[in-house]
Image (tube, rainbow, N blue to C red):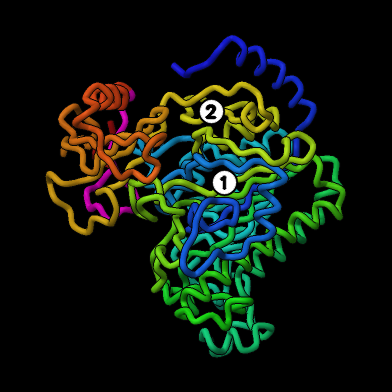
Amino acid sequence: MLMITVQALTAACCLSSALAAMRPNIIWIMADDLGWGEPGLYPSSSPHGRIATPHLDQFGREGIVFTHAYAGYTVCAPSRTTFFTGRHSGQFVKHRWTGQAIEPDQNVTTLAEVLSSVGYRTAAFGKVAPLTSPLEQGFEAFTGQIDQGLCHNMYPKQIDTGMKQLNLELVGNRREKSRQLCMKDPSLYNYTIDVFHDYGMAWLESVAKKPEPFFLYMSYTVPHAGGWGDAPQEPEQGAPVPTDLQYADKPWPDVEKDHAAVITYLDSKVGDIMRRLKDLGADANTLMFFASDNGAHLEGGHSHLFFNSTGGLQGHKRSMFEGGMRSPTMARWPAQIQSGRSSSFAWAFWDVLPTMAELAGAAVPAGLDGISIVPELLGQPQTKHKYLYFTWIGDGGRHLGAHPTVGPGYVVREGRWKGMVPHCMDSEKWQPSMGDEMRVYDLETDPFETTDLASKQPDIVHRLKSLVISEELTCMCFQCGFQKDDMAIVV
């Protein structure tokens, strides 16, 4: 059962009735592959200095900086699946989800549907994977890129809008394209980050003064590696950005100048949203979140070590270590959230749906893994998770070949303790078992996961294994290169 106190229950009851009348506007800003140590308020240092994020720094100072918030997974689409559904990857097989696409006919209740059911205006701009038809899955407006592979194209000839794909022409990108040409005269081209942002801001302007509350999902496709290609190409040539800003003259490789610039460019979009909310008189009662869908990447020639993008956390994107899953998550809500707070409360993307449902006064679908973190947002007693759970394969890296006895594994966090099983021993159902070889880390005293305590803490090993076995979870990983048909092992 969840750890909860009488005081927390009493506070929750009072909170719910107060929030029923509040119904804030909600904006979720999603970065793609941003490392935990890259925004300025997160601890990090490197010989090359820090990447400038003045607006995100302001965002955090005006709200809460979460130091132990997690994305939903260690790679994009499965992480976002947890975001939209309220369920972690240990449950995907039960629901016959691939972790990469959710179709309308699967009858999955999405976050957007929960909010629209109680009168919220809803819109999504940018990357919407795993949703394949956002207008049939809770959003009333959409412009962006549905195919997550095509999101690698940041100067494409077409993107998606409404009910169709590749139906919005970006005429500037019909001309010859390259890093040099697109940076020489950015005004001649259509950079997708600008297009997503402009459509999103036009929608925000249209709804901000209406009586109904709104939910805006701004899902940018940076700093994910990308290129200058067109469908069906999915290049990861570098970090496309219109200008290298203050980094242009740095004695760094081009890809690292571009990486720094694209994060500062994204930061400017966050600043523009904050400014517009104030100009529209909607800032006070708008709850804004900023997060990344997984840890720092090392793709397109970029090294996550160049700027110490994980803030010293071990691992990176596609890793079971903290650097693969910890998200630089912040929240601000001027009318309700006390500014200048830092929270070490551990939560993950699957908590987003029940949190927003409580704020909106909406019913929560049955059987979710997530809990509402509204009390933590407001500085009230907060129910804690029984556990957090993630799947992947190997401790850090992609498994490229199927093997009958070497397959996916899992991570479980219970309070300060983290158990890591790189490969589950059950090669038939791929479920946790007592025979799994588990590493144990104390995240309180060893945040960088340098010391495996499994041999010294056998009771913790037994407790963590017993916990996940009792929950009847799967070890199956998603978007991980593992070849076994996960739909054939429904538990």
Q: Which residue is mark 2?
A: 371
Q: Quadrant of residue 145?
A: bottom right
Q: Quadrant of residue 9?
A: top right
Q: For the residue carrying disc 2, how many other residues have a C-alpha within 10 Å: few (<14), some (14-19), or many (20+)?
A: many
Q: What secondary structure is the magenta-colored segment mainly?
A: loop
Residue situated in front as seen by the camera: 92 or 475? 475
Q: Which residue is mark 1?
A: 329
Residue drawn at the location 65% of the way across and 55% of the way down: 56
Is 488 positioned to the left or the right of 359 in the image? left
Residue drawn at the location 49% of the way across and 73% of the way down: 239
Give the image location of residue 177, x and y in percent.
53, 86
Residue situated in front as seen by the camera: 368 or 133? 368
Q: Is residue 469 something that shows in the picture?
A: no
Residue 395 painted magenta: no
Please tell me how many numbered marks the rendered image carries. 2
First in sequence: mark 1 vs mark 2: 1
Vertical comparison of 434 with 288: above or below: above
Q: Secondary structure at mark 2?
A: loop
Vertical comparison of 410 with 11: above or below: below
